[in-house]
Amino acid sequence: MASTKKPAAAKKVEAPIDQRETFVSLQKNFADSDISVEEKLKTLYELQAADSEIDKIVQLRGELPAEVAALEEEIASLKERSAAISAVIDQFNRNIADAKLSIADHESTIEKYQRQLETISNSREYDSLNKEIENQDLLRQIDEKTIYDTRAAIGEKKAELDEIKDRLTVRAEDLSAKKEELDTIVESTAKEEAVLTARRDECAAKIDARTMSAYERIRQSVHNHLAVVGIYNGDSCGGCFNTITPQRRVEIASNRKLIICEHCGRIIINPDFDQK
């Protein structure tokens, strides 16, 4: 008996997202969806509205986040320099200690040779020991100069270290003040931002990955971050203010097609969405 089981429906294969894809392919993908084009356009409109409100909140913070980050980076760099200089000073102190031990060895050797001189009657050996004593004394003088020069270098490094510590104190105070100011702003807008972020996430979840990629790309490419705009003054793009042809205005009003401004690349939607 022949089987009556229906063949499984072919699974839709999603093409990888190409950041350079044309808007023609994006329009085709936009129309090929489980939800209506009108619903997707309305969702994009609401997504842009949420993002614009979030942008306003971010603007309230001004340059504070960047200033805080810059101060934190500078403080970290100053601490690294301070640690490096402290390590150099420690090494200098070890060099001084080694030089002192070396001086003690030279003095001990000189004393030994001087005692030997008292018992030597051979002029050749006498001259040889005197030469060794001179060499040891010269080496001792070199070690003493090393100690003198190293102590001077330590003084310079300590002055540099003190300067860095002073700068660290000032920068730490600046950072504390900036952080306090930023925290005050963030705290005052936290609830509103949380609501807007939740709304944004809800909208984003309804939009396919390809359209979201295009939306984000447009937002990043325009100065005011408006990827979705309405019609301005009845006949112009709300983003670049270039005139829209009557035919395209009809297409926009129909809510049946994704319309991209041919001048600025923004998505143009029916301005009546906010009245529905």
Image (cartoon, helix red, strand yellow):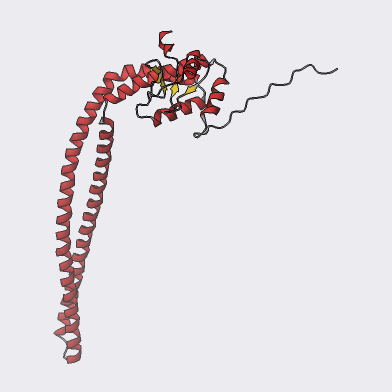
Q: Residue at x 50, y 35 (%)?
A: 20
Residue 228, percent from left and from top: 42, 21
Q: Residue at x 25, y 51 (%)?
A: 84
- Residue 143's quadrant in the figure? bottom left
Above-or-below relation of 141 to 73: below
Spot the residue most to the right. Answer: 1
Q: Residue at x 40, y 30 (%)?
A: 220
In depth, the one of 78 and 127 nearer the eye is: 78
Looking at the rendered image, the quarter that the N terminus falls into is top right
**Numbered marks: total:** 0
Q: Is residue 22 left or right of residue 95?
A: right
- Residue 120's quadrant in the figure? bottom left
Task: Answer whether residue 122 is visible to the viewer in this image.
Answer: no
Q: Is residue 76 left or right of residue 253?
A: left
In depth, the one of 161 and 177 nearer the eye is: 177
Task: Answer whether residue 62 is visible to the viewer in this image.
Answer: yes
